[in-house]
Image (cartoon, grey):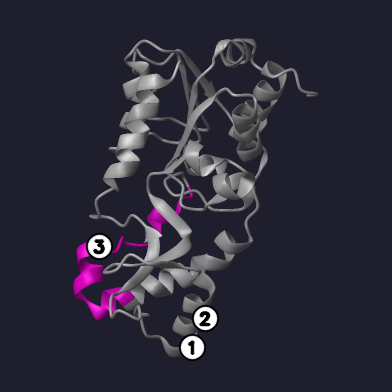
């Protein structure tokens, strides 16, 4: 059964800002990052500065990324991604701003004009010097064969196009997110602990303008006690959000 207040907010909204975290990707078989069984508990992060200055760090980084690559390569969008596309097709989507690096919003059909991947994407490899992007598969296979961190034709270090610890977010992505937060008339956070900044500041920017703010997550978030939160639902976003969108849009539930 859908939540009546969530449905009413979605029905009334015209410019929804959807903010998503790792909790929506678990429905596609990708492990959560900061949840109780999150990936972050298993390994120390490799910082961007170490990647850029140490060959050993680059090899360790690529080893970790190659281990995770099949789960990202083979993952398929789930009903949350589809629901966001439904909002866009109905003319109700201001922007999807995601912390996820799995590329599933784009794969699911969200248009590039309505998508900000704040922490980058694992679906591309980027040169740290010339910034040319390429498909990961050949680089992954070459690393697995040679155990040597790959280089660009220009000589620059190649790295999955994600934002590493200690690496700055892209200014254009922050600008697009801020613009969406300034225009939204409803903001919904899905599957995020809202603990990583500056990303977690995006929904708060919209909420503190006085627009309704909905937080849906299984487990606590750092915004739970914030007075700007209009509605807090604890549970599986894959069960709660798509049904509410369907009902709000008058689609078969």
Quarter that holds the C terminus: top right
Q: Quadrant of residue 244?
A: top right
Question: In the rendered structure, are the residues bearing label 1 and label 2 in contact, judged by CB atoms less than 8 Å apart?
Answer: yes
Q: Is residue 19 visible?
A: no
The answer to if 42 sits in the magenta stretch is yes
Q: Residue 48's mark?
A: 3
Helix, strand or loop at disc 3?
helix
Q: Please tell me which of labels 2 and 3 falls first in the chain.
A: 3
Q: Quadrant of residue 9?
A: top right
- Would you name the residue on which mark 2 appears? 141
**In front here: 35 or 228?**
228
Residue 206: percent from the left, percent from the top? 36, 20
Residue located 28% across and 74% down the image: 57
Q: Is residue 241 visible?
A: yes
Q: CA distance from mark 1 to mark 2?
A: 6 Å
**In front here: 127 or 238?**
127
């Amino acid at each position: 059964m859908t939540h009546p207040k969530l449905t009413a907010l979605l029905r009334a909204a015209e410019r929804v800002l959807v903010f998503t975290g790792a909790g929506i990707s678990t429905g596609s078989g990708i492990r959560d990052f900061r949840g109780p069984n999150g990936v972050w508990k298993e390994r120390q992060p490799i910082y961007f500065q170490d990647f850029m200055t140490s060959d050993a760090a680059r090899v360790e980084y690529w080893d970790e990324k190659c281990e995770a690559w099949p789960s990202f390569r083979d993952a398929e969008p789930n009903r949350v991604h589809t629901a966001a596309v439904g909002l866009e097709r109905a003319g109700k989507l201001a922007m999807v701003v995601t912390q996820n690096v799995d590329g599933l919003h784009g794969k699911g059909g969200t248009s590039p004009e309505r998508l900000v991947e704040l922490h980058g994407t694992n679906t591309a490899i980027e040169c740290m010097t010339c910034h040319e992007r390429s498909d990961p598969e050949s680089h992954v296979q070459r690393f697995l064969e040679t155990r040597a961190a790959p280089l660009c034709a220009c000589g620059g270090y190649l790295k999955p196009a994600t934002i590493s610890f200690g690496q700055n977010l892209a200014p254009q992505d922050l600008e697009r997110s801020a613009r969406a937060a300034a225009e939204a008339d409803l903001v919904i956070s899905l599957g995020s602990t809202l603990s990583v900044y500056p990303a977690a500041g995006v929904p708060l920017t919209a909420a503190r303008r006085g627009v309704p703010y909905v937080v849906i997550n299984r487990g606590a978030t750092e915004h739970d006690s914030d007075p700007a939160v209009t509605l807090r639902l604890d549970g599986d976003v894959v069960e709660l959000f798509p049904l509410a969108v369907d009902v709000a849009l008058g689609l078969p539930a």
